[in-house]
Amino acid sequence: MTYSAKEGGYIDGETTQKVESGKDGLTVVAVPYDGYEFVKWSDGRTEATRQDINITADISVTAEFKVKIEEQTKEYTVTYKANEGGTITGNVNQTVKEGENGTEVTAVPDDGYEFVKWSDGVTEATRQDRNVIKDIVVKAIFEKQTYKLTYVASNGGYLLGNANQMVAYGENGTKVMAIPNDGYRFVK
């Protein structure tokens, strides 16, 4: 019995064996080199390890190998940005293998701002993109906090100007004047 190997591997075991008719041979293994994989033996057997049994004729087989093709996993970029009024904590530029999950990021508003939503509609400030199958670029949207200013005059006077105002953080309201009625004076 003769065992040989084509390019890409070698035979582990006795490559030349003499066996009496009806007896079994010794086990041999077709071992691929790095970058190769075992395909089959020249007689069609597909198991790399073989032991020929009950030998009744000469056997001469060759192990066949092929270059191993590494499956290249697609990778996608996941990018997080922030508009004026806040920042992002966490890794804002991620490379994620197809079907895997990105890491968690959080949109953090600056003083006087509030987180509204992400540009893709997600309303939770903390997010983790899962099962990534495409490039993702999203922006955290922040808005200035607004405050309602309400002015009310008591009996004996009235107001000139807008008594109900919505004012953004850090900005000024419009002028309001308290005018006393006849016989009254402004106190405070």
Image (spheres, grey):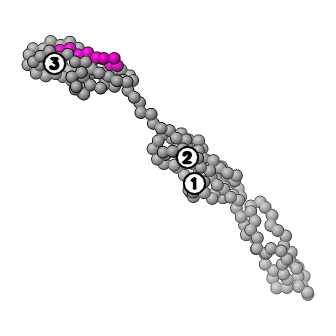
**Kind of element beneath mark 3:** loop
| Labels 2 and 1: the sequence-earlier one | 1
Q: Residue at x 34, y 19 (%)?
A: 8
Give the residue number, with chain letter if any, for mark 2: 136
The relative height of residue 77 versus residue 83 in the rendered view (above or below) is: above
Residue 101: image x %, image y %? Answer: 48, 45
Q: Quadrant of the N terminus?
A: top left
Give the residue number, with chain letter if any, for mark 3: 25
- Label 1 packing within 10 angstroms: few (<14), some (14-19), many (20+): few
Q: Is residue 25 visible?
A: yes
Q: Which residues are magenta?
A: 1-9
112 left or right, relative to 101: right
Is residue 106 magenta-colored? no
Tell me the CA gap for discs 3 and 2.
59 Å
The relative height of residue 168 versus residue 48 in the rendered view (above or below) is: below
Q: Residue at x 76, y 70 (%)?
A: 165
Tell me the CA gap for discs 2 and 1.
10 Å
Label 3 with label 2: CB-CB less than 8 Å = no
Q: Which numbered tag is attached to residue 120?
A: 1
